Amino acid sequence: MEERTAAPALALPHAPDDRRERALDILCSDELEPIVELVAWSMGQDRFGVRAHDGCVIYGRVRDGHGWSYSIESVDGRNPLADQATGRFTGIDQLRASPYPDRRANSYPHAYDELAQIFDHRDAPDVYAVHTAAHNWEERGGNRGEHGSVDSVQSRAVFLAAGSGIRSLGEQDRSCRIIDIAPTVLALLGARPSGGVGPNGGPRADALLARQDGEIIPELIDPAASPPAHVVCVLIDGCNLDVARDLAARGEAPSLARLIATGSLFTHGAIASSPTVTLPNHTSAITGSQPAHHGILHNAWRDRATGARIVTESPATWAFAMNNLSSDVETLFAAVARSVPGARSAAINEPCDTGADFSTFAHVRAGAMPAIDSAGSGVPHANAEHTAADEGYSWCSMIDHAAVNQFVQQWSDGPPTFTWINFTLVDTAGHKGGPDSPIARAAIHDTDARLGELLATIDDSGKSGSTAIFVLSDHGMEDTDPAVKGDWQAALDAAGIPVTDEQGFLYLTA
C-alpha cells in the first residue's frame, strides 16, 4: 500500500453509517434505477456490501495463502454479483444483439475481488456507485461509448500474444486478468522469483515483482523455447475486443490477423481492474497489482488527509501521474532491469513510465515535447473523413503517429529488451461513436496499420525471430443509450446529503 504521512485530522472523514445508508437508499431507488447498476461500500474488518435496485449481498474475505477467499454472509433479494462469468456477450453477434444489457442479464467477472480491493486504499470513497451499461453520462460529455463499470463488456480488455517463446494456441475461449500481464512478461523473459508481497499484503515467495497481485499464465509460454531477446507490448486504449476480432476476420485489421494466426488470443479477454478506466489499468498492466495497491486509484479521487483533488488523467497532469505511484510496487521497466542483465527499456507515449530508460513523458516533464506532425503534413494511416470532421480523431492520429516514429527511432538505436507503446485513437473514437460505430472501426483500422509499421520495423531489424509481442487494451468499451441520462449527485443534493463525486467515487462530506 502507498504510505503517506497522516494529517492530524482528516479533511474528508468517512461518513457515518446513517448518512451512508440514506445515500444507498437514494442510489438504489426507483428514480435512479436506470443509471445506477450497483453500489459498493466497505463495512470494515474485511466485510463488504454491494446493493442494486433489486437486491443486496454482504460478503467477507479471509486470507488464503498469499491471496483471498470470499464467502457470502447474507443475500436480500437478488445477489447483484451472482453471475461472474467472463464470457458473457462475446463475439460480434452477441455484442450487437445485447446493447447495454440489463443488470439481470449481465455478468461481473471477479467482482468480489475487484470491488473489495478498492477499499484497501486509505483514500477509498464512502460509496462506489457503478453506472449502468445504458447510462449516457452527461457529466462526462454524454459519450456514446463508455467504460468504467465492472460489467463484462466494459471490463473485457484485448489480450493477444505471439512471437518468440509464445505458444501458438489460436483463439482460446478463456480469459486472464490485466494484473496477470506483468508477471507473464517477466516469466517469458526468464526472470526468477525474488519474493515480494501478494494480494493480501502478506509475503509471496513466488513473486516476480515487489507487489504481485496477478498470476503467470503458464500455458502461454512454450517451455521448450529459449526466452526472447526482446518483448514489445502494444496497448490499444479502449479497444473493444469483439469489434477488433471482427475486423481481423474481415481482413480489415491484417496486422492483428497475422498475430492471431501465429499466436494466442483469449476471446474472453484480460479482465480489467476496477474501476475500468485508463490510468488505473495502464498501471495495473505494468505493475501486476491492483489500483488500491499501486496507488493510481482512479482517473481522479480525493486525498482524505488534505481534501485535495488528485487528478491523473488530464493534459495538465498526464505526465506527472506517477507521482502517485506507491513505492511498494515495481513496474515492468524496473523489474526487467533488475532481472535481465544489460536490459534496456522504452516507454513510448505511456504515462506509467517509472524505471524506463527512454520515456516520452520524461521528455515532456523536462519541457521537451517530442515532435508531432501536423495533420496538414499528411499523417499516414489517418482516416480522411474522420480526421477532417473530428478534432479528437485528428489529434490522436498525430500523437499515435509520433509514437510510431519514436518506436522506429528506439529500434534503430538497437532494439530495447522491453518496449511498451501506447496508442490513444481507438478510445477517443469509441467514446465518440460507440465501439461498433464507423468512427471506432476506422480507428481500429488506422491503429492496425500503425501496428503493421511496428511489425515491419521488427522484421527489418532482423529480430523478429527473437521478439515476443503482446497486444492488449486497458479496458473495454460499451455502447450507451442516448435516452438514458441523469445525475445521481442531483438526487443526493436534493435529499440534503452533501457529496463529492469523482466519477462514481462518492465522498459523503460533512
Image (cartoon, rainbow, N blue to C red):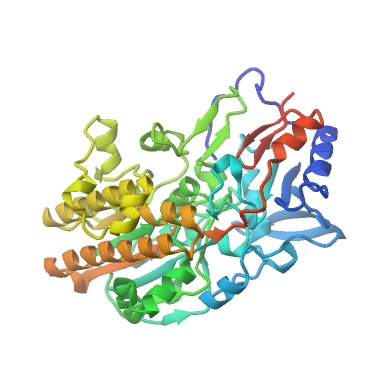
Percent across and percent down for residue 467 are 24, 68
Seen in the image, is 69 located left or right of residue 208?
A: right
- Report the number of discs: 0
Name the one closer to the observer, 63 or 436: 436
**Which quadrant of the figure contains the C terminus?**
top right
What residue is shown at x 55% (from left), y 77% (from top)? Answer: 93
**Vertical order, 27 against 224 (above or below):** above
Percent across and percent down for residue 267 are 49, 74
- Say which quarter of the image contains residue 372: top left
Percent across and percent down for residue 375 are 23, 48
**Which quadrant of the figure contains the N terminus?**
top right
Name the one closer to the observer, 47 or 234: 234
Seen in the image, is 413 located left or right of residue 260?
A: left
Seen in the image, is 40 located left or right of residue 184?
A: right
What residue is shown at x 83% (from left), y 57% (from top)? Answer: 55
**Vertical order, 365 against 49 (above or below):** above
